[in-house]
Amino acid sequence: LAGLGDEAKRRIAEAEFIFGGKRHLALVASFARGKPCPWPVPFDAGMADVLALTGRNVCVLASGDPFFHGVGVTLARKVKPEQMLVLPAPSSLALAASRLG
């Protein structure tokens, strides 16, 4: 959570529905007020749930690089850009590398 900015934390806290892996949902449980929605297996089944909530305040949590073979790519194919706000944060690899110098 150290890499999340204030706006990202605020948006997570204000979301009605929060989709993510169980690990991601556990990380935000202390301040997220919306309904936690763990990704089902297979992953694509969760996309129907996200799309069914179009127009609602939905947050999708991701780690790593979600626009490189991740949930970001899948969302971008199905959701109009004007309906999506992406708040990137440094990856754990980038944070570790910056500390090593």
Image (cartoon, rainbow, N blue to C red):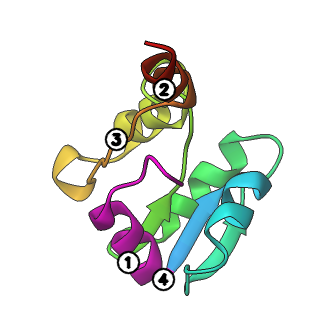
Q: Which residue is mark 1?
A: 56
Q: Is residue 76 above or below residue 30?
A: above
Q: Are marks 2 and 1 in contact (CB under 8 Å)?
A: no
Closest to the observer, 79 or 7:
7
Q: Which residue is mark 3?
A: 88
Q: Is residue 61 left or right of residue 39?
A: left
Q: Upstream in the sequence, badge 2 or badge 4?
A: 4
Label 4 vs label 1, nearer the camera = 4
Where is residue 14? Give x, y as percent. Answer: 40, 82
Label 2 vs label 1, nearer the camera = 2
Where is residue 70? Give x, y as percent. Answer: 55, 28
Tell me the amino acid under the disc marked 1.
Arg
Q: Regarding mark 3 in the picture, which secondary structure is present there?
A: loop
Label 2 vs label 4, nearer the camera = 2
Assign the C terminus to one quadrant of the image.
top left
Label 3 vs label 4, nearer the camera = 3
Q: Which residue is mark 2?
A: 65
Disc 2 packing (10 Å; few <14; some 14–19; many ≥20)? some
**Residue at the image point whose x is 76% and y is 53% from the top:** 23
**Residue at the image point whose x is 21% and y is 45% from the top:** 81
* Magenta stretch bounds: 1-16
Q: Regarding mark 4 in the picture, which secondary structure is present there?
A: loop
